[in-house]
Image (cartoon, rainbow, N blue to C red):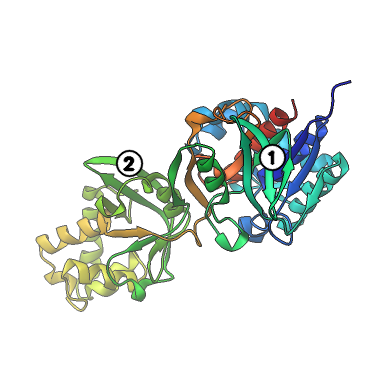
Amino acid sequence: MAEMKRIAVIGGGASGLMAAYAAAKNGALVTLYEKNEKLGKKIYITGKGRCNLTNDCLPDEFLQNVVHGEKFLTGAIWSFPPLRIMEFMESHGLALKTERGNRVFPVSDHASDVTKTLEMACKEAGVNIVLNAKVEKIDILQGTMRGIIIKNQAIIYDGVIVATGGLSYPSTGSTGDGYNFAQLCGHKIVPPVPSLTGLNLAGDYTSIQGISLKNVVLTAIYKGKTISSRMGELLFTHYGISGPLVLSLSAEVNRVPIKEVSLYLDFKPALDDKKLDARLLRDFAERKNETIKNVARSLLPNHLVQHLLKKAGIGFDKKVNSITKEERGTLIKMLKKFPLIPVSLRGFDESIVTSGGISLDEVHPKTMESKLIKGLFFCGEVLDVDAFTGGFNMQIAFSTGYLAGEGASK
Protein backbone atom coordinates (compact mmCIF):
# COMPACT_ATOMS: atom_id res chain seq x y z
CA MET A 1 0.00 0.00 0.00
CA ALA A 2 1.37 3.42 -0.99
CA GLU A 3 2.28 5.74 1.86
CA MET A 4 -0.08 8.70 2.36
CA LYS A 5 1.28 11.99 1.10
CA ARG A 6 1.80 14.73 3.69
CA ILE A 7 0.55 18.09 2.41
CA ALA A 8 0.76 21.56 3.99
CA VAL A 9 -1.66 24.29 2.91
CA ILE A 10 -0.62 27.86 3.74
CA GLY A 11 -3.68 30.11 4.06
CA GLY A 12 -7.22 29.43 5.27
CA GLY A 13 -9.22 31.49 2.80
CA ALA A 14 -11.49 30.26 -0.01
CA SER A 15 -8.73 28.72 -2.16
CA GLY A 16 -6.80 27.26 0.79
CA LEU A 17 -9.84 25.62 2.37
CA MET A 18 -10.87 24.11 -0.97
CA ALA A 19 -7.32 22.91 -1.64
CA ALA A 20 -7.11 21.32 1.80
CA TYR A 21 -10.46 19.59 1.30
CA ALA A 22 -9.57 18.28 -2.17
CA ALA A 23 -6.18 16.96 -1.04
CA ALA A 24 -7.66 15.23 2.01
CA LYS A 25 -10.52 13.69 0.00
CA ASN A 26 -7.88 12.28 -2.34
CA GLY A 27 -6.19 10.48 0.53
CA ALA A 28 -3.49 12.93 1.66
CA LEU A 29 -2.64 13.82 5.25
CA VAL A 30 -3.31 17.55 5.22
CA THR A 31 -2.40 20.31 7.66
CA LEU A 32 -3.74 23.80 6.97
CA TYR A 33 -1.86 26.73 8.51
CA GLU A 34 -3.69 30.04 8.99
CA LYS A 35 -1.86 33.02 10.48
CA ASN A 36 -5.06 34.69 11.72
CA GLU A 37 -7.07 33.69 14.77
CA LYS A 38 -9.87 32.39 12.53
CA LEU A 39 -10.42 31.03 9.03
CA GLY A 40 -11.82 32.92 6.04
CA LYS A 41 -11.32 36.48 7.24
CA LYS A 42 -11.65 37.85 3.72
CA ILE A 43 -14.69 35.64 3.00
CA TYR A 44 -16.47 37.45 5.86
CA ILE A 45 -16.34 40.79 4.04
CA THR A 46 -17.06 39.62 0.47
CA GLY A 47 -20.38 40.62 -1.07
CA LYS A 48 -20.82 43.23 1.68
CA GLY A 49 -20.82 40.49 4.28
CA ARG A 50 -23.20 38.25 2.32
CA CYS A 51 -20.54 36.42 0.24
CA ASN A 52 -21.26 36.25 -3.47
CA LEU A 53 -19.58 32.85 -3.71
CA THR A 54 -19.92 32.15 -7.44
CA ASN A 55 -21.79 33.05 -10.62
CA ASP A 56 -24.36 30.53 -11.89
CA CYS A 57 -23.22 30.44 -15.51
CA LEU A 58 -21.60 28.01 -17.93
CA PRO A 59 -17.78 27.85 -18.21
CA ASP A 60 -17.67 29.67 -21.57
CA GLU A 61 -19.63 32.62 -20.21
CA PHE A 62 -17.60 32.55 -17.02
CA LEU A 63 -14.31 32.85 -18.92
CA GLN A 64 -15.61 35.93 -20.76
CA ASN A 65 -15.62 37.66 -17.36
CA VAL A 66 -11.97 36.87 -16.63
CA VAL A 67 -9.76 39.94 -17.12
CA HIS A 68 -6.31 38.35 -16.74
CA GLY A 69 -5.52 34.63 -17.08
CA GLU A 70 -8.46 33.44 -19.19
CA LYS A 71 -6.43 30.87 -21.15
CA PHE A 72 -4.65 29.61 -18.02
CA LEU A 73 -7.96 29.21 -16.15
CA THR A 74 -9.85 27.40 -18.95
CA GLY A 75 -9.01 23.91 -17.65
CA ALA A 76 -9.70 24.82 -14.03
CA ILE A 77 -13.12 26.35 -14.74
CA TRP A 78 -14.17 23.39 -16.92
CA SER A 79 -12.86 20.87 -14.34
CA PHE A 80 -14.48 22.60 -11.36
CA PRO A 81 -17.21 24.92 -12.74
CA PRO A 82 -19.73 27.02 -10.78
CA LEU A 83 -22.18 24.10 -10.73
CA ARG A 84 -19.63 22.02 -8.77
CA ILE A 85 -19.17 24.57 -5.99
CA MET A 86 -22.94 25.02 -5.74
CA GLU A 87 -23.41 21.26 -5.45
CA PHE A 88 -20.57 21.10 -2.92
CA MET A 89 -22.10 23.80 -0.69
CA GLU A 90 -25.61 22.37 -0.86
CA SER A 91 -24.43 18.79 -0.24
CA HIS A 92 -22.74 20.08 2.92
CA GLY A 93 -25.95 21.72 4.15
CA LEU A 94 -25.66 25.32 2.88
CA ALA A 95 -28.81 26.51 1.08
CA LEU A 96 -28.11 28.87 -1.83
CA LYS A 97 -30.04 31.45 -3.85
CA THR A 98 -29.36 33.14 -7.19
CA GLU A 99 -29.90 36.88 -7.59
CA ARG A 100 -29.57 39.52 -10.33
CA GLY A 101 -26.71 38.85 -12.73
CA ASN A 102 -26.60 35.14 -11.76
CA ARG A 103 -24.87 36.03 -8.49
CA VAL A 104 -25.05 33.18 -5.97
CA PHE A 105 -25.38 33.83 -2.22
CA PRO A 106 -26.19 31.74 0.85
CA VAL A 107 -29.93 31.93 1.64
CA SER A 108 -28.97 33.13 5.13
CA ASP A 109 -27.14 36.18 3.67
CA HIS A 110 -24.31 35.43 6.11
CA ALA A 111 -20.80 35.11 4.65
CA SER A 112 -19.78 33.34 7.86
CA ASP A 113 -21.94 30.37 6.81
CA VAL A 114 -19.76 29.86 3.72
CA THR A 115 -16.63 29.72 5.90
CA LYS A 116 -18.33 27.38 8.38
CA THR A 117 -19.39 25.04 5.55
CA LEU A 118 -15.85 24.91 4.11
CA GLU A 119 -14.36 24.37 7.58
CA MET A 120 -16.82 21.57 8.36
CA ALA A 121 -16.08 19.85 5.04
CA CYS A 122 -12.34 20.06 5.72
CA LYS A 123 -12.67 18.63 9.21
CA GLU A 124 -14.92 15.81 7.97
CA ALA A 125 -12.25 15.00 5.34
CA GLY A 126 -9.62 14.82 8.08
CA VAL A 127 -7.81 18.15 7.60
CA ASN A 128 -5.79 19.29 10.62
CA ILE A 129 -6.36 23.06 10.99
CA VAL A 130 -3.77 25.14 12.87
CA LEU A 131 -4.68 28.77 13.64
CA ASN A 132 -2.35 31.63 14.68
CA ALA A 133 0.38 29.89 12.71
CA LYS A 134 2.52 32.10 10.48
CA VAL A 135 4.71 30.20 8.05
CA GLU A 136 8.06 31.95 7.82
CA LYS A 137 9.66 30.14 4.91
CA ILE A 138 9.27 27.34 2.39
CA ASP A 139 12.15 24.87 2.57
CA ILE A 140 13.50 23.65 -0.78
CA LEU A 141 16.22 21.09 -1.40
CA GLN A 142 17.72 20.64 -4.89
CA GLY A 143 14.62 21.96 -6.68
CA THR A 144 12.23 19.72 -4.72
CA MET A 145 9.82 20.54 -1.91
CA ARG A 146 11.24 19.79 1.50
CA GLY A 147 8.70 21.46 3.80
CA ILE A 148 7.99 24.65 5.71
CA ILE A 149 9.59 26.56 8.55
CA ILE A 150 7.30 27.77 11.33
CA LYS A 151 8.48 29.22 14.65
CA ASN A 152 12.05 28.40 13.56
CA GLN A 153 11.17 24.72 13.24
CA ALA A 154 11.38 22.82 9.96
CA ILE A 155 8.45 20.47 9.24
CA ILE A 156 8.89 18.06 6.35
CA TYR A 157 6.08 17.70 3.78
CA ASP A 158 5.71 15.99 0.41
CA GLY A 159 3.86 18.99 -0.98
CA VAL A 160 3.08 22.57 -0.05
CA ILE A 161 0.13 24.59 -1.40
CA VAL A 162 0.48 28.38 -1.19
CA ALA A 163 -2.98 29.99 -0.84
CA THR A 164 -2.05 33.22 0.90
CA GLY A 165 -4.12 35.65 -1.22
CA GLY A 166 -2.96 38.91 -2.73
CA LEU A 167 -2.62 42.39 -1.21
CA SER A 168 -6.22 43.61 -1.16
CA TYR A 169 -7.79 44.21 2.26
CA PRO A 170 -4.48 43.73 4.14
CA SER A 171 -6.40 43.91 7.44
CA THR A 172 -7.62 40.37 6.66
CA GLY A 173 -4.03 39.10 6.52
CA SER A 174 -3.42 39.49 2.76
CA THR A 175 0.02 41.03 3.03
CA GLY A 176 1.88 39.45 0.11
CA ASP A 177 3.44 36.50 1.95
CA GLY A 178 2.89 34.22 -1.04
CA TYR A 179 4.77 36.54 -3.39
CA ASN A 180 7.77 36.41 -1.06
CA PHE A 181 7.64 32.60 -0.87
CA ALA A 182 7.40 32.36 -4.66
CA GLN A 183 10.23 34.82 -5.34
CA LEU A 184 12.55 33.01 -2.94
CA CYS A 185 11.78 29.85 -4.92
CA GLY A 186 12.79 31.60 -8.16
CA HIS A 187 9.34 32.60 -9.46
CA LYS A 188 8.64 35.83 -11.33
CA ILE A 189 5.97 38.16 -9.90
CA VAL A 190 3.82 40.34 -12.15
CA PRO A 191 3.70 43.62 -10.15
CA PRO A 192 0.51 43.56 -8.04
CA VAL A 193 -1.96 46.44 -8.52
CA PRO A 194 -5.41 47.13 -7.02
CA SER A 195 -8.41 45.91 -9.02
CA LEU A 196 -12.17 46.37 -8.68
CA THR A 197 -11.71 49.69 -6.92
CA GLY A 198 -12.59 53.38 -7.20
CA LEU A 199 -10.65 56.07 -9.06
CA ASN A 200 -9.12 59.23 -7.61
CA LEU A 201 -9.76 62.18 -9.94
CA ALA A 202 -8.16 65.59 -10.27
CA GLY A 203 -10.53 68.39 -9.28
CA ASP A 204 -13.11 68.98 -6.59
CA TYR A 205 -16.12 66.64 -6.51
CA THR A 206 -17.41 67.41 -3.03
CA SER A 207 -20.44 69.33 -4.39
CA ILE A 208 -21.67 66.22 -6.24
CA GLN A 209 -20.46 63.44 -3.92
CA GLY A 210 -23.18 60.91 -3.23
CA ILE A 211 -24.88 61.36 -6.60
CA SER A 212 -25.51 57.97 -8.21
CA LEU A 213 -26.26 57.61 -11.92
CA LYS A 214 -27.63 54.59 -13.77
CA ASN A 215 -27.18 53.68 -17.44
CA VAL A 216 -24.26 56.02 -18.12
CA VAL A 217 -21.28 55.06 -20.30
CA LEU A 218 -17.70 55.46 -19.09
CA THR A 219 -14.94 55.23 -21.70
CA ALA A 220 -11.19 54.94 -21.12
CA ILE A 221 -8.73 55.77 -23.91
CA TYR A 222 -5.00 55.07 -23.75
CA LYS A 223 -2.59 56.05 -26.53
CA GLY A 224 -5.50 56.65 -28.89
CA LYS A 225 -7.02 53.21 -28.26
CA THR A 226 -10.26 52.53 -26.37
CA ILE A 227 -9.33 50.06 -23.62
CA SER A 228 -12.72 50.10 -21.90
CA SER A 229 -16.18 51.41 -22.71
CA ARG A 230 -19.12 50.07 -20.77
CA MET A 231 -22.53 51.06 -19.47
CA GLY A 232 -23.59 50.81 -15.85
CA GLU A 233 -24.03 52.52 -12.53
CA LEU A 234 -21.60 55.19 -11.34
CA LEU A 235 -21.25 56.96 -8.00
CA PHE A 236 -19.54 60.31 -7.44
CA THR A 237 -17.49 60.41 -4.22
CA HIS A 238 -15.37 62.95 -2.35
CA TYR A 239 -12.27 61.56 -4.10
CA GLY A 240 -13.72 60.97 -7.58
CA ILE A 241 -15.80 58.03 -8.84
CA SER A 242 -16.83 54.55 -7.72
CA GLY A 243 -19.75 52.18 -8.25
CA PRO A 244 -20.09 48.96 -10.28
CA LEU A 245 -19.18 50.63 -13.59
CA VAL A 246 -15.97 52.09 -12.19
CA LEU A 247 -14.96 48.88 -10.42
CA SER A 248 -15.13 47.01 -13.72
CA LEU A 249 -13.24 49.73 -15.56
CA SER A 250 -10.49 49.72 -12.92
CA ALA A 251 -9.76 46.07 -13.78
CA GLU A 252 -9.13 47.06 -17.40
CA VAL A 253 -6.97 50.16 -16.82
CA ASN A 254 -4.87 49.10 -13.81
CA ARG A 255 -1.89 47.91 -15.84
CA VAL A 256 -1.29 51.11 -17.80
CA PRO A 257 -0.06 54.47 -16.41
CA ILE A 258 -3.35 55.79 -15.08
CA LYS A 259 -2.39 59.45 -15.51
CA GLU A 260 -2.03 58.83 -19.25
CA VAL A 261 -5.60 57.51 -19.54
CA SER A 262 -8.31 59.82 -20.93
CA LEU A 263 -11.69 59.23 -19.29
CA TYR A 264 -15.02 60.40 -20.68
CA LEU A 265 -18.52 60.09 -19.25
CA ASP A 266 -21.62 59.96 -21.45
CA PHE A 267 -24.60 60.99 -19.33
CA LYS A 268 -27.11 60.32 -22.13
CA PRO A 269 -25.96 57.28 -24.15
CA ALA A 270 -29.49 56.67 -25.51
CA LEU A 271 -29.36 60.01 -27.37
CA ASP A 272 -26.83 60.93 -30.04
CA ASP A 273 -25.72 64.56 -30.43
CA LYS A 274 -28.46 65.35 -32.97
CA LYS A 275 -31.28 63.89 -30.83
CA LEU A 276 -29.93 65.56 -27.71
CA ASP A 277 -29.81 68.91 -29.51
CA ALA A 278 -33.43 68.44 -30.62
CA ARG A 279 -34.40 67.62 -27.03
CA LEU A 280 -32.70 70.78 -25.74
CA LEU A 281 -34.32 72.97 -28.43
CA ARG A 282 -37.74 71.55 -27.54
CA ASP A 283 -37.20 72.13 -23.80
CA PHE A 284 -35.89 75.63 -24.45
CA ALA A 285 -38.91 76.50 -26.63
CA GLU A 286 -41.37 75.25 -24.02
CA ARG A 287 -39.64 77.02 -21.11
CA LYS A 288 -37.97 79.98 -22.84
CA ASN A 289 -38.25 82.38 -19.89
CA GLU A 290 -36.72 79.98 -17.34
CA THR A 291 -33.08 79.73 -16.33
CA ILE A 292 -30.79 77.09 -17.83
CA LYS A 293 -30.19 75.75 -14.31
CA ASN A 294 -33.89 74.90 -13.90
CA VAL A 295 -34.49 73.60 -17.42
CA ALA A 296 -31.45 71.30 -17.35
CA ARG A 297 -32.81 69.58 -14.23
CA SER A 298 -34.94 67.45 -16.54
CA LEU A 299 -31.66 65.90 -17.73
CA LEU A 300 -29.56 65.57 -14.56
CA PRO A 301 -29.74 66.01 -10.75
CA ASN A 302 -29.56 69.64 -9.60
CA HIS A 303 -26.02 69.68 -8.13
CA LEU A 304 -24.69 67.86 -11.17
CA VAL A 305 -26.35 70.42 -13.47
CA GLN A 306 -24.52 73.21 -11.66
CA HIS A 307 -21.23 71.29 -11.86
CA LEU A 308 -21.66 70.84 -15.63
CA LEU A 309 -22.71 74.44 -16.29
CA LYS A 310 -19.66 75.65 -14.37
CA LYS A 311 -17.40 73.44 -16.52
CA ALA A 312 -19.19 74.67 -19.65
CA GLY A 313 -18.76 78.30 -18.63
CA ILE A 314 -22.51 79.00 -18.73
CA GLY A 315 -24.07 81.12 -15.98
CA PHE A 316 -26.59 79.26 -13.82
CA ASP A 317 -29.20 82.02 -14.08
CA LYS A 318 -28.95 82.65 -17.81
CA LYS A 319 -32.37 82.44 -19.47
CA VAL A 320 -32.62 79.67 -22.06
CA ASN A 321 -33.93 82.12 -24.69
CA SER A 322 -30.50 83.80 -24.61
CA ILE A 323 -28.42 80.60 -24.81
CA THR A 324 -26.33 80.76 -27.98
CA LYS A 325 -25.87 77.93 -30.48
CA GLU A 326 -22.21 77.69 -29.36
CA GLU A 327 -23.21 77.40 -25.70
CA ARG A 328 -25.77 74.74 -26.59
CA GLY A 329 -23.03 72.86 -28.47
CA THR A 330 -20.73 73.09 -25.43
CA LEU A 331 -23.51 71.77 -23.19
CA ILE A 332 -24.12 68.83 -25.55
CA LYS A 333 -20.41 68.04 -25.52
CA MET A 334 -20.41 68.10 -21.70
CA LEU A 335 -23.40 65.76 -21.59
CA LYS A 336 -21.99 63.33 -24.16
CA LYS A 337 -18.25 63.47 -23.49
CA PHE A 338 -17.66 64.86 -20.02
CA PRO A 339 -13.91 64.71 -19.31
CA LEU A 340 -12.61 63.16 -16.07
CA ILE A 341 -8.93 63.31 -15.16
CA PRO A 342 -7.74 60.13 -13.37
CA VAL A 343 -4.90 60.55 -10.89
CA SER A 344 -4.65 57.08 -9.33
CA LEU A 345 -6.52 53.95 -8.35
CA ARG A 346 -7.76 53.68 -4.79
CA GLY A 347 -5.40 51.61 -2.64
CA PHE A 348 -5.26 47.92 -1.75
CA ASP A 349 -7.20 48.60 1.46
CA GLU A 350 -10.26 49.33 -0.71
CA SER A 351 -9.72 47.08 -3.74
CA ILE A 352 -11.83 43.93 -3.89
CA VAL A 353 -9.03 41.88 -5.49
CA THR A 354 -5.39 42.10 -6.50
CA SER A 355 -4.39 42.09 -10.15
CA GLY A 356 -0.93 40.67 -10.78
CA GLY A 357 0.92 37.98 -8.84
CA ILE A 358 2.84 34.80 -9.60
CA SER A 359 3.59 34.56 -13.33
CA LEU A 360 1.34 31.98 -15.01
CA ASP A 361 4.17 30.96 -17.36
CA GLU A 362 5.76 29.13 -14.43
CA VAL A 363 2.68 27.22 -13.17
CA HIS A 364 1.06 24.08 -14.66
CA PRO A 365 -2.59 25.01 -15.41
CA LYS A 366 -3.92 21.46 -14.92
CA THR A 367 -2.40 20.91 -11.46
CA MET A 368 -1.33 24.40 -10.23
CA GLU A 369 2.12 22.92 -9.56
CA SER A 370 5.20 25.09 -9.94
CA LYS A 371 7.20 24.37 -13.11
CA LEU A 372 10.34 25.26 -11.14
CA ILE A 373 9.92 23.39 -7.84
CA LYS A 374 8.50 19.87 -7.65
CA GLY A 375 5.85 19.58 -4.92
CA LEU A 376 5.11 23.33 -4.72
CA PHE A 377 1.61 24.48 -5.67
CA PHE A 378 -0.19 27.84 -5.90
CA CYS A 379 -3.89 28.74 -5.97
CA GLY A 380 -6.25 31.67 -5.67
CA GLU A 381 -5.42 35.35 -5.65
CA VAL A 382 -1.68 34.80 -5.24
CA LEU A 383 -1.66 33.88 -8.96
CA ASP A 384 -1.73 36.47 -11.76
CA VAL A 385 -5.47 35.93 -12.36
CA ASP A 386 -8.44 38.22 -11.78
CA ALA A 387 -11.98 38.80 -13.02
CA PHE A 388 -14.89 41.23 -12.86
CA THR A 389 -17.34 41.40 -9.94
CA GLY A 390 -20.20 38.93 -9.69
CA GLY A 391 -18.72 35.92 -7.88
CA PHE A 392 -16.09 35.21 -10.53
CA ASN A 393 -13.06 35.80 -8.31
CA MET A 394 -14.39 33.53 -5.56
CA GLN A 395 -15.01 30.81 -8.14
CA ILE A 396 -11.43 31.20 -9.42
CA ALA A 397 -10.27 30.63 -5.84
CA PHE A 398 -12.38 27.47 -5.52
CA SER A 399 -11.45 26.07 -8.96
CA THR A 400 -7.69 26.65 -8.66
CA GLY A 401 -7.80 25.47 -5.04
CA TYR A 402 -9.50 22.23 -6.02
CA LEU A 403 -6.96 21.53 -8.77
CA ALA A 404 -4.04 22.35 -6.44
CA GLY A 405 -5.39 19.98 -3.79
CA GLU A 406 -5.93 17.21 -6.32
CA GLY A 407 -2.52 17.80 -7.90
CA ALA A 408 -0.66 17.80 -4.59
CA SER A 409 -2.32 14.58 -3.39
CA LYS A 410 -1.38 12.52 -6.48
With respect to residue 75, does 155 lie above or below? below
Q: Quadrant of residue 280?
A: bottom left
* Residue plotted at (64% across, 43% down): 54
For the residue pair 391 and 374, the one nearer the viewer reads as: 374
Q: Residue at x 36, y 47 (%)?
A: 253
Characterize the local packing of mark 1: few (<14), some (14-19) or many (20 or more) Cα atoms within 10 angstroms. Answer: many
**Mark 2: secondary structure:** strand
Q: Position of residue 278 (x, y in %)?
A: 22, 54
Compared to residue 113, the image places residue 396 above or below, namely above
In this view, the residue in front, 173 or 102, is 173
- Report, in whole angstroms, how far the alpha carbon at label 2 lies from the one at label 1: 44 Å
Residue drawn at x 84%, y 26% as measured from the top left: 3
- Secondary structure of the residue carrying tag 1 is strand
Residue 150 appears in view: yes
- In the rendered image, the residue lying farthest to the top is 1
Query: Is 312 left, or right, of 182 in this rendering?
Result: left
Q: Give amino acid for label 1.
A: Gly
Q: Are marks 2 and 1 in contact (CB under 8 Å)?
A: no
161 left or right of 28?
Answer: left
Residue picked out by circle 2: 227
Task: Mark 2 vs mark 1: give the one in front.
Answer: 1
- Which percent across, then down, holds residue 113? 77, 55
Question: Looking at the rendering, in which quadrant would you find the C terminus?
Answer: top right
**Relative horizontal placement of residue 164, taking residue 132 as reference (left or right):** left
Q: Residue furthest bottom?
A: 317
Q: Is residue 232 above or below residue 45?
A: above
Q: Position of residue 21 (x, y in %)?
A: 77, 39
Please give the residue where the numbered disc 1 appears in the rendered image: 147
Q: Which amino acid type is shown beneath numbered disc 2?
A: Ile
